[in-house]
Image: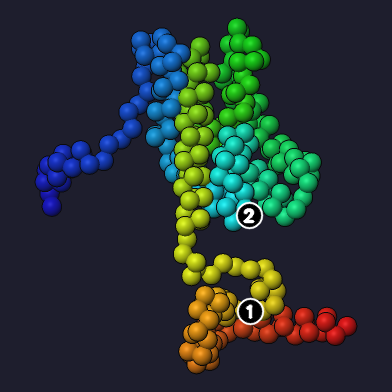
Amino acid sequence: MTLAGFASVMRGTTHIVRLPVPLPPQDSPSWQSPLRAFAWGVRSVASTVLTLVLFATYLGIGALAHDTHFSLGWVLAGTALVWAGPAQIILISTLGSGATVVQAAIAVTVSAIRLFPMVVSVVPMIRTPRTKRRHLMLVTHFIAVTLWVECFRLLPQVPRERRIAFTHGLGTGLVSVCLVANAIGYSLAANLPQTVCRRSPAADAAGISAFDRAQLSAACRHPGAGTRIGAVSARGQLAHRRRYPDQWRVGRHHRLWRSLVARA
């Protein structure tokens, strides 16, 4: 294909892929209103690939909250109030393992210390001589890794007097994406087919393979099919052993260790 032919094809396909609209110039009338600056911040969420990363991450957090028996409202409130993904995973895992609220709060606070240098580096880009501390409270809450990166990319294009409103919009848009991802992940985890075999730490410690757990699950759901399942179990276990020899070797060592401990 010649260069002219390639250019003609690309002109015909530009309506399929649209690049994000750049921010208006700093002297544009679009920055005269704080509400418009807020809207530009929300709109800028669609201009970064990090939004997709956040969406995928919070899908997993929603599923994790469901598997640890937290309610959907609880995980949504955690996303809105805690916001940082690693801190939320720490909060869910510590509370789900039986830790107290104080212990979980200490763990989350320690993990949030890493965000302090980000806040220190972003706040000078936003402040003006007339900015008060209360104007920065919501901004500092929104500052995490994603917002920190996007502030360095986008704030130089925003008039300084509108940067607080713009950051509010950007943070609100990112949190909204995460809330939607939480709800979808929670719903997907709640509606997974029961035939999907979930990992069990106790079964792993006992050396029970995923194949055995699937067979036991099927036998519990269909008691009358026990004979048929037993007939094919030996062939299935042999095939699984040939395909995953390391898993069976580790499982045998686990069973030996558990028998020695029981005898002791």
Q: In the rendered view, tell whether residue 6 sits above or below residue 124.
A: below
Is disc 1 in contact with disc 2, using a CB cutoff of under 8 Å? no
Q: Which mark is residue 208?
A: 1
Write the residue at 71% across / 49% down.
Answer: 95
User: Is the residue marked by circle 2 packed among few (<14), some (14-19), or many (20+) residues within 10 Å?
Assistant: few
Q: In the rendered view, tell whether residue 127 sits above or below residue 204.
A: above
Q: Quadrant of the C terminus?
A: bottom right
Write the residue at 41% across / 29% down.
Answer: 44
From the image, tell me which residue sits under label 2: 68
Q: x%, y% of residue 154?
A: 46, 26
Residue 58 visible in the shown view: no
Residue 36 visible in the shown view: yes
- Of the two numbered discs 1 and 2 on the same chain, state the one appearing first in sequence: 2
User: Is the residue marked by circle 1 packed among few (<14), some (14-19), or many (20+) residues within 10 Å?
Assistant: some
Which amino acid lies under the numbered mark 1 shown in the image of this protein?
Answer: Ile
SS category of the residue bearing label 1? loop
